[in-house]
Amino acid sequence: MLLEEIRYILEDLERLEQAVVDRLVDEPTQVRDRLNREHEVAQLLDHMQAQSGEALRLYGDAHDMRADEVSLLGDDGDPLQLFYRNLDDTLAYHQRYPTDQVDQPELRYRHRPPQPLGEYGYGEFQPTLVDTMFSGEEGFGRYFDLNANYEAFVNLPNVKRLTYLQYLEVFDQFGESNPFLASQKRSDKLTDDYFQYVGGLADYLEGFMRKTRPLENLDRVFAGFDDDFEALWSRDELPSWKTAGSLGAAGEGAGSTADGGAGGSTPQLSSPEAVWCADCEKEFKNQNVYKGHLSGRKHVRAAEQRAQAQSAASRDGSNGNASGVGGAAAAAAHRLKEKAVAAREYRVQRLVAAMSTEKDDTRVNVERRQGMTERERRQELDNLYAMLQESAAAAQAMDVDGSGGRADGRRGEAEDDNDDDDDDDKVYNPLKLPLAWDGKPIPFWLYRLHGLGVEFDCEICGQYTYMGRRAFEKHFNESRHIHGLRCLGINNPGLFRDITKIEEALRLWDKLEKEKKRNKQDESSVVQMEDAEGHVMPEKVYYDLQKQGLV
C-alpha cells in the first residue's frame, strides 16, 4: 500500500535523524575515531536525502493512488475488512518464506563501536571504513603521501634532482618561484608526462580532501576553483601563462626576436629592456646579450626543432585551405592545451592552500621520521596499535554496558565499572606536558629534545609566548607576526627574522630606509661628465653649471 510505504519512509527518516544525533553527541579524542564518525554521518545524510526524495515522489501522487487508498479506507462497508485482508496477505507471505529473517529497524542504524585489533594487525576483526581508506604514510588523513608523485616529478625532463623533503616544500609551485623548475622550458609543460604528473597530483589532493572532509560541500568548493580559474584565464592574468598580446610595451624586445611560437604566448618579462627568445624559451637581460646568444649551438638546435614543429603543425592544419587558417587552428589548439595544463596547476595550488596545515605537518613528520632509527619506528607502530586496541576495547565495553542486552541484570555493577573507567580515563599529567594527537602527554624526553620548556616572547605579536624554538622560528612566517610588522609600517618582513622587539624593528627599518635613499643619491653620481677643458664631474653638477653658463 502507498500509505504504508510513506509511513515506513517517514519512520526511517526519524531513525536516521536519531542515528546522526547519536554519533554527533560523542566527541572522539582520536583522529581515527573522529574521521570514522564523520564518514558514517555523511553516509547517513546521503541515505536520508535519498529517502526524502522518494517520500516527495510518493506525496506527489501523479496517479492519485493515495487518494484511492484513503477513499477505500473510508467506505461505508466493514472498516476492518481491508485490515483482515492485508493481515491474511502478510501471514500467507511468511508461510511461504518461513526462513526470512525478521527486520529489526531499531538495530538498522545502531552505532557500532570500533572493533579492537588482533594480535598481528586486524586479525579476525572487521576494520572500519577509515582503516581501509588511508595508507600508513597518511596517518588517518593527517599527512600527505606524495611518494608516487615525487617519483613522477624527478623523471620529468629538465628538472633538477631534489630530495623528497625538498619536494614537499615546492610541489605546489610551478613558476619561477620553484628553483627546481628553473631550467624547464614552457614546451616541456605541454608534454604527456608533465600533463599526467600534474593531473595525478591534482586528483590525489582532491581525493585526499574528500576523504578528510566528508561533511563539507566540496563540489561547490571545487566549482568555485574552476570559476576563479576561468575568470583569470579570460583576463589573461595567470603569471606563467600570459600571451604575447597582453604584455604591451613590456614585450617589445620579445616582439622583435620571436613571433610568439605555436600559440603566440610569451611570459611576463622582468624589465622593459629584457628580450625573450621564443626558440629557447628563455629571457635575456638586454638586446646585446640576446644577439650573442643567437650564435650558440643550443639556440641553433632549438630554432631547428621549433621550425620543424611549426611546419608539421601547418601541414596538419592546412587540409587544403590557406596556410593562415591552418596556423590559426594550430595556435588555438596549442592554447587549448596550455589551458588544460594551467587549470590543473591552478587546482593544485588552491587545494594546497586549503590544506596548508596538512602540508606543514607532512614536512615535519617526514623530517622527524628520517631522524628515527629502525627500533624507534617499530616502537612507534607498536604504540599506535596498542592505543587503537585500548580505544576500541573501551568503546566496545561502554556499548555493551549501555545497551539493554548482554548486561544480564547487572546494571549496578556496570555503572560502577563505568565510574571506575571514567577515573582511569583521566590523564595523569603533573608536569603539564603538551598533549599529542592521541590526547596523551608527549614523552618527557621529547619535551626536552625540542626545548618545549623554553619560552620565547614576541613583542611584535602582542607579547605572545611561544613554547620551543621550532614554534618560535615558525611564527615569523605566520599571519600574526606579519600583521604586527605591517601595523608598524614595515612592508618587508623577510628582513626582520629573529627580531621580536618593536624598538629594534623600527630602528632597523629606519636604517634600511636611509640606506635606500643614500643609494639613490649615489646612483646619481655614477654618470660622469667631462667639459670642454677636460674636467670630470658628476652629471648633476655638470648640468647645474651648464644652466648657469659656466661650462
Image: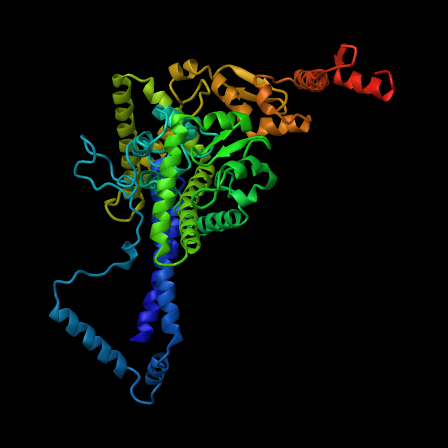
Q: Quadrant of the N terminus?
A: bottom left
Res 322 seen here: yes
Residue nearer the viewer, 142 or 250 = 250
Residue 407 horizontal/vertical position (percent)? 25, 44
Tell me where residue 533 sits by quadrant.
top right
Residue 413 horizontal/vertical position (percent)? 29, 38
Residue nearer the viewer, 46 or 115 = 46
Residue 325 horizontal/vertical position (percent)? 43, 56
Tell me where residue 54 sits by quadrant.
bottom left
Q: How is the image coloured?
A: rainbow
Query: Is 16 above or below relative to 437?
Result: below
Tell me where residue 34 sits by quadrant.
top left
Q: Is residue 430 left or right of residue 494?
A: left
Q: Is residue 274 left or right of residue 189?
A: right
Residue visible at 36% across and 37% down?
305
Residue visible at 72% across and 19% down?
524
Query: Is 349 above or below relative to 119?
Result: below
Query: Is 341 above or below relative to 384?
Result: below
Residue nearer the viewer, 206 or 280 = 280
Res 19 seen here: no
Residue 442 horizontal/vertical position (percent)? 39, 21
Residue visible at 56% across and 21% down?
465
Query: Is 329 above or below relative to 280?
Result: below
Q: Is residue 284 left or right of residue 428?
A: right
The number of callouts visible is 0
Q: Quadrant of the C terminus?
A: top right
Residue extending farthest front: 532
